[in-house]
Image (spheres, grey):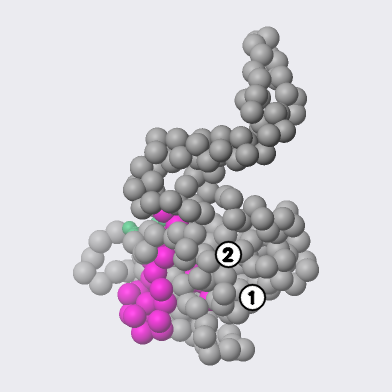
Amino acid sequence: MRVIILTPYPEMFPGALGHSIIGNALDNKKFSLETINLHDFGIDKRGSIDDQPFGGGPGMVIRPDVVENALNSVLFNSKSIRKIFLTPSGQKLTQNILQELSQHTEMVILCGRFEGVDQRVIETLGFQEISIGDYVLSGGEIAAQVLVEGCIRLIPGVLGQPQSLLEETFSNNLLEYPHYTRPQVWEDNQGNKHEVPEVLTSGHHEKIERWRKDKSIEKTKTLRPDLFKKGI
Ligand code: SAM
C-alpha cells in the first residue's frame, strides 16, 4: 500500500509508524509513506495555507486552493485512490473501516489544523471524513498515524502471528479476554501475592477456551454493552 500524507507538519512522520511492527513493515516495503508539505503550496512567500473563516468566528481555515495544488502534485498509480480527511466531525473509525481501507493500494490522508479545512475541498475533491474518536486533538497528524497503523497491521504478512487478528478485540463484537504471563505467582512491592487463574495452567485446552470466552463476554457486557447488543 502507498500512503500519502498531506500535512503542514511533515516532520511529524513517520513518528510512531517508524517503530516496531509497522516500522519493520515500512523497512520491508509492505507499505510506503510519503509526506507532502502543505506549506510548499502556500499562497505567499511565507507559505501561508490558511485564512479567516467567512461568517466570522475564531480560528483559521485551511484554504481549498492550497489543498488542491498539494493533491495535484501527487502522481497516482491507480484510479481507485482513497482520499481521507481526518476530522472529529467525521464518521467514527472502526475495525471494519480499517479492514476495508487495508484492501486499497493507494491512500491519501489530509491532516487538518486550526478550525479545519474549507468544506469545498471535501465535497469537490472527494475526501471521506473520518474521526478517530469523540474528542478533539489539535491536528490530524496523530490521527493519521492511528489510522495508518491500524490499517497496515491488517495487510497479510505484516503481523508475525496473523492468528492474533482472529481473536483480538472487536472480532465477533467482543472485547478480548485478559492475558497473564510469568511469574505464575507475582508478589507486588507491598508483599501481596497475586496468582494466575488456575484454569490457565491446567493444560486443559477446552476449559481454557471456555474460560476465555466467558471472560470476553463478561468484559464486553460490563465495558461495552453497545457492542454486546450487536450480537456475537
Ligand atoms: N473545528 C473542528 C471541530 O470542531 O470539529 C476541530 C478542529 S481540530 C482543533 C484541528 C484538526 O485536528 C482537525 O482538522 C483534524 O484534522 C484533527 N483532529 C482533531 N480531532 C480529531 C479526531 N477526533 N479525529 C480525527 N482528526 C482530528
Furthest residue in direction top, as rendered: 191
On the rendering, which quadrant does ligand 1 occupy? bottom left
Q: Residue at x 65, y 24 (%)?
A: 198
Residue 215 within the segment the image draws in magenta: no
* Amino acid type of the residue tagged 2 in the rendering: Cys
x and y, in percent, of residue 19 in the image: 72, 55
* Residues rendered magenta in the picture: 108-134
**In the displayed image of the protein, which residue is found farthest to the right?**
28
Q: Are the residues flagged by discs 2 and 1 in contact, CB closer than 8 Å?
A: yes
Q: Position of residue 27 (x, y in %)?
A: 77, 66
Looking at the rendered structure, the number of numbered marks drawn on it comes to: 2
Which residue is at a point 53% across and 90% down the rendered structure image?
A: 79
> Is the CB atom of the residue marked by disc 2 within 8 angstroms of ligand 1's nearest atom?
no
Q: Name the residue at 56% across, 34% down.
A: 211
Which element carries disc 2, helix, strand or loop?
Answer: helix
Instruction: Compute the Cα span from label 2 to label 1.
Output: 10 Å
Image position of 190 with respect to 232: above or below: above
Confirm whether residue 45 shows in the render.
no
- The answer to which of 215 and 84 lies nearer the viewer is 215
Say which amino acid is labelled 1: Met
Task: Choose top left, top right, bottom left or bottom right for residue 157.
Answer: bottom right
Residue depicted at 64% across the width and 68% down the height: 155
Q: Residue 4, located in which quarter of the rendered image?
A: bottom right
Tell me if residue 128 comes above or below residue 180 in the rendering: below
Residue 103 located left or right of residue 127: right
Q: Within 10 Å of the Cα at label 2, are there few (<14), some (14-19), or many (20+) other Cα atoms?
A: many
Q: Earlier in the sequence, mark 2 or mark 1?
A: 1
- Looking at the rendered structure, the secondary structure element under dot 1 is loop
Q: Report if residue 191 is visible in the image.
A: yes
Which residue is denoted by mark 2 in the rendering?
151
- Mark 1 highlights which residue? 1
